[in-house]
Amino acid sequence: MDFKRHIAARVKAEGLTENDIYSMIELPPNTEMGDFALPCFKLAKTMRKAPALIAQQIAADYQTDGIVGEVSAVNGYVNFKIDRALWAKQTLEEVLSAREKYGSGEDGEGKTVCIEYSSVNIAKPFHIGHLSSTVIGSALYKLHKFLGYHAVAINHLGDYGTQFGKLISAYKRWGSREEIEKGGLRALNALYVRFHEEAEKEPSLNDEARAFFKKIEDKDEESVALFEWFKELTLKDVGKIYELLDVHFDSWAGESFYIDKMQPVIDELREKGLLKESEGAQIVDLEAYGMPPCIVLRSDGASLYATRDLATAIYRKETYDFYKSLYVVAYQQNLHFKQFFKVLELMGKEWAKDLVHVAYGMVSLEDGSMSSRKGRVVYLEDVINRCIEKARGIIAEKNPSLENKDEIAKTVGVGAVIFGALYNNKIKDITFSYDKVLNFEGETSCYVQYTCARAHSVLEKGGTARSCTAKEVCPQEFEIVKQLAEFPAMLRDALDKYEPCFIARYAVDLAQKFNKFYFDCSILNADEDTRAFRLSLTEATLVVLKNALSLLGIGVPEKM
Ligand code: ARG
């Protein structure tokens, strides 16, 4: 039952439709006045009356019923009080019958959404800078699927560029097969770093690197084989991290996939009169839009990052006929996305409006950031492992007799990493702190997981008697009911704004509300009816907390 809808359908306000009213109804943070409120300030202009008078009129005209028992007008707001027991009953019944599907829907039926995220670079470290793209993108992917969209997760591998020439040159000079097989990505990166050091002393190395890159492009057998091997090693290494983070992809088509798809784009740009020559390069002039030109071909005829992205966008439209195509990429690339989106628009692609750059801020560690050239880089794998280790330590201290300690430490440690990257609005720069993300009393995943374990233990002790009916609903219970009822709307809001942090915050809120209830009200020692109701409330909370965490890729141990 949608109480907002119920109210909106019954409010009489001149010149406004039910949907207008619906979108104006708020959930006031303080529920003393009412459970829903309709602010009348915006109506003052069209109705040419003071908001307080409008509110009084609406309140007087409203017919109360068994659902909305009380209506009042206060300071320009109309406040509605819902029958709380009814609200609780309906909410709990809904949660407990839908369970892991609670909050899901068919909102996206028939719509395909491409979500590009993580997009790691071959033979370059998978470092903490890739964390946000990976976990934000993965959460958006899961959320879209949960709401019935056909979602396509794409890892747009950085597998094209002169750096592969450098790597081959370095490998042939200083590398060995065994060393690389053993050391994986890190050994490859060490070669890359060494190349840069040596090339500073001996610039001719750069020519050698260029020559090797050209060989890859010309499909020279040995160079291509080396490149493919580097790619395989990288994917093996990052695959382990994806598995830990519960991250999945439907397509791994990276930059090199588009090499033979660029010429048609260049031809089309030329046909449409969009290409201009500038210092030997071919560009699309974007001055009229306040942007530097988008360079499509270098003076030596080589394509650029933007050229590949133009081809990629077109390919995705042709292949998936997307409703939206998302790019979860750091805000440092804002200009790049604005430029090539604009170029597509100038090409007459009306769907350019459906491309979305989901930008996010930088992640740095407390002890400073990193640079892959100088080799001072923080590997994501190390960050995850350190979190797991730390979680193991905390668990050993808190609950030494716990079974499955390793498994649980993994779930807790990985959750801390994901939540740490997700908890803030995505555009904010964040500093990752091990102590903060593993604070059991903080706004963290382990706090939520711990709350789940608490709920689980209550349910285990509580037996099977359950009831969704309460004679009276106390404030602590009601706070939980309202929060549970908000879950579906919150998910839609998170999707509309591409903000998985809404889900993370929601989970912390709900956990806090549950803990307040847990400490203030007795569950197991209450009278029989109250106890059965409180057990249902506990169970519904657990279901929803699990749903929220699972959308973020975080598991929930039964015991902690
Ligand atoms: N691989 C790139 C990087 O690590 C990100 C790719 C972004 N996606 C795109 N379609 N340009 O910086």
Image: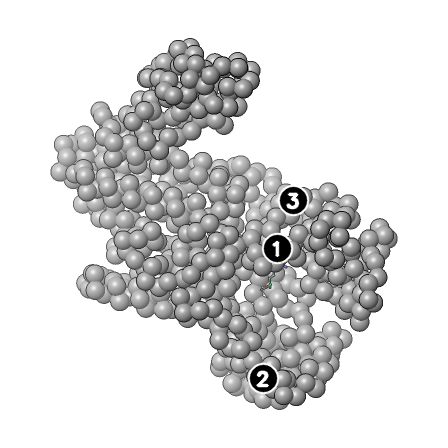
**Residue type pointed to by label 1:** Asn
The answer to whether the beta carbon of the residue marked 1 is less than 8 Å from any atom of ligand 1 is no
- Residue in the foreground of this view, choosing between 233 and 510: 510
On residue 197, the disc is 2
Residue 548 image offset from top left, x and y in percent:
40, 46
- Say left or right for 409 vs 120: left
Please tell me which of labels 1 and 2 falls first in the chain.
2
**Residue type pointed to by label 3:** Asp
Q: Residues within 10 Å of mark 3 (few under 14, many from 20)?
A: some
- Distance from disc 2 to disc 3, alpha carbons, whole Å, reads 43 Å
Q: Residue at the spot x=36%, y=42% of the render?
A: 544
Q: Residue at the spot x=50%, y=64% of the render?
A: 129
Instruction: Label 3: state its secondary structure.
Output: helix
Across the whole image, how many numbered discs are drawn on residues? 3
Q: Are marks 1 and 2 in contact (CB under 8 Å)?
A: no
- Distance from disc 3 to disc 1, alpha carbons, whole Å, reads 16 Å
Instruction: Label 2: state its secondary structure.
Output: helix
Q: Residues within 10 Å of mark 1 (few under 14, many from 20)?
A: some
- Residue in the foreground of this view, choosing between 256 and 205: 205
Q: Are marks 3 and 1 in contact (CB under 8 Å)?
A: no
For discs 2 and 3, the disc positioned in front in the rendered view = 2
Q: Residue at the spot x=73%, y=42% of the render?
A: 350
Mark 1 = which residue?
334
Tell me if residue 354 comes above or below residue 239 in the rendering.
Answer: above
On residue 397, the disc is none
Mark 3 = which residue?
354
Please tell me which of labels 3 and 1 falls first in the chain.
1
Residue 489 makes an appearance in the image:
yes
